[in-house]
Image (cartoon, grey):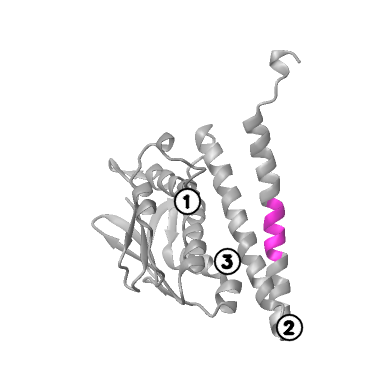
Amino acid sequence: MPVNDKLDFSSVLATAVHDMKNSLCMLTQSTESIALRSKQMGREDSEELSRLHYEVSRLNGSLMQLLALYRFEKEQMPMTIEEQYLEDLLNDIYFKNQTFIEQAEMNVEIDVESSLSWYFDGVLVDYLLNDIVVNALRYSKKQIKISAKQADNYLCIQIDDDGDGFPQDIIDLANIEVASQINFVKNRSGLGLFFAKLIAKAHINSGKEGKIKLENGSSLGGSRFSLYLP
């Protein structure tokens, strides 16, 4: 095969991921509708359908991360900075996961002033926060709190849970600045954390970059994820 006929495998992979993501979005919507009808009919398989919906959402989130990371690498990820109302953003994330939340009888509290707004890329931050919430739903016991406030010229969005907290190696991963230092095979959470940091740092205002922070001992006794946007 001539040299200039070689496939750009990364581009092919990105196209395949995009197609899979679209299919998974349709599958997510279908399982959500089926799970809702099943619950209304009192069928015993409604819990399994909710779990299926949750796992499909996780997989879809992972594909979105891969596609976004590819676009960042190719410098094809445009930043669309617009005014966003935090109450709308956080409620949208809740509704995306409502099927699993209700089936698992989770208590999810949203704490934000209705007037709070900030300038950032709503799509990318939605990806980031939804991935964190999906993981919090997986590891928490029964409670999650999602809050947003302005603090020290930053927008601070926090996700607290009542689980067992982050392992120390995950907290250490969040402090690694260079992607090449992360073993993505050994540390599956490394990709999600790198994705979160990349999106946070892409938000720059007055010389300040966005950042994330992981810690234990949240208001609910478990882990806390914090996103700071300047």
* Left or right position of 198 against 3: left
Res. 53 mark: none
Name the N-terminal-most of marks 2 and 1: 2
Q: Name the residue type under label 1.
A: Ser
User: Which residue lies under the disc numbered 2?
Assistant: 43
* Closer-to-camera residue (64/215): 215
Label 1 crowd (10 A; few <14 / some 14-19 / many >=20): some
Q: In this view, does 117 lie to the left or right of 89?
A: left
Q: Looking at the image, tell me whether mark 2 or mark 3 is earlier in sequence order.
A: 2
Place of residue 30 in the rendered image (x, y in percent of width and height, measured from the top left):
73, 66
Quadrant of the drawing holding the N terminus = top right
User: Mark number for residue 96?
Assistant: 3
Residue type, numbered disc 3: Lys
Q: How far apart are marks 1 and 3 (CA)?
A: 22 Å
- As for residue 92 lying within the magenta part, the answer is no
In the rendered view, tell whether residue 219 sits above or below residue 134: below
x 31%, y 72%: residue:
219
Q: Is residue 116 visible?
A: no
Task: Please name whichever residue, 209 or 165, is drawn nearer the observer in this view of the structure.
Answer: 165
Let me know if residue 23 appears in the view: yes
Decide: marks 2, 3 in contact (CB < 8 A)? Answer: no
Q: Any magenta on residue 23?
A: yes
Closer mark to the observer between disc 2 and disc 3: 2
Label pair 2/1, CB-CB below 8 angstroms: no
For residue 189, the mark is: 1
Q: Is mark 3 on a helix, strand or loop?
A: helix
Mark 2 is on which residue type?
Answer: Arg
Who comes first in sequence, dot 1 or dot 3? Answer: 3
Residue 169 in percent (x, y) is at: 37, 51
